[in-house]
Image (cartoon, grey):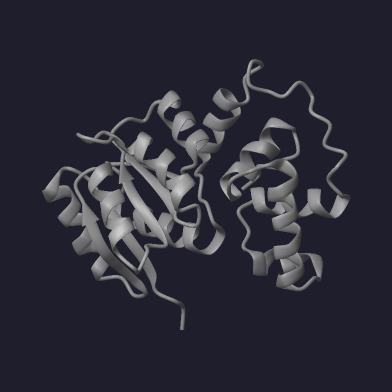
Amino acid sequence: MNATIKIALVDDEILFRKGISFLLQREDNVEVIFEASNGEDLISQLNENEVKPDLIIMDLKMPVLNGVEATKIIRKAFPDIKIIALTSYDTKSFIANMIQVGAVAYLIKNTTPKDLILTIREVAAKGFYYNENVLKTIQETIVSPKNTKGGLDTSFLSPREVEVLQLICQQKTTAEIAEQLFLSPRTIEGHRNNLLLKTESRNIAGLVVYAIQNDLADLTI
């Protein structure tokens, strides 16, 4: 049986938040452990609660402390918690900003319940989930000439690490990568940890951005 995915919901619109909570409570292996109405409320609950969420569904536009600033704080204080950005704004600058501060997925508020559940399960399994629209935005916005690292030397990555990185970019799980490369999942975890260290990426989502920036990614999903 799969482990339960523990979720925190953060949105200042109570009705919307309760709607998502109701939806998620009906799913197997998904549990909403607490809700918050803004970033400050969220951070105080994270500090107080012994049980931490695996992932946070975070609205971006909130009073007191907005989702972007809250994400920056959580990335430093609780680096293991994954953040799914939730917003009404489908603009490239919003997407790029949230990815750069450390969100691992991006959902528009008019998304379908099916897409919400898919995103949660993909993030829980793989560490991130970017749909085609978000991947395109990463390529167009984050990988603009002023942001590229000037043809960064990627020779410090081994051929095997590059191979693993490309499969991560195809949104394959550790188990799927292990099976494809005839290696153990533990070996793949080792390669993934080396990639995070070598590329100075904060999370798997950062690895994907790095791969795109350096023309290492095969984004045929």
Q: Quadrant of residue 86?
A: top left
In this view, which residue lies farthest toward the front? 48
Q: Nearer the viewer, residue 48 or 154?
A: 48
In x, y percent, where is residue 196?
Answer: 68, 49
Residue at 31 percent of width and 49 percent of height: 43
Q: Nearer the viewer, residue 138 or 55?
A: 55
Q: Nearer the viewer, residue 116 or 202?
A: 202
Residue at 48 percent of width and 36 percent of height: 101
Is 82 left, or right, of 188 in this rendering?
A: left
In x, y percent, where is residue 185?
Answer: 71, 71
In x, y percent, where is residue 19?
Answer: 17, 55
Is 147 left, or right, of 79 in this rendering?
A: right
The answer to whether residue 133 shows anywhere in this view is: no
Is 17 left, or right, of 218 in this rendering?
A: left
Q: Quadrant of residue 144?
A: top right
In x, y percent, where is residue 77?
Answer: 45, 49
Residue at 72 percent of width and 71 percent of height: 186
In this view, which residue lies farthest toward the bottom? 1
The answer to whether residue 65 shows anywhere in this view is: yes
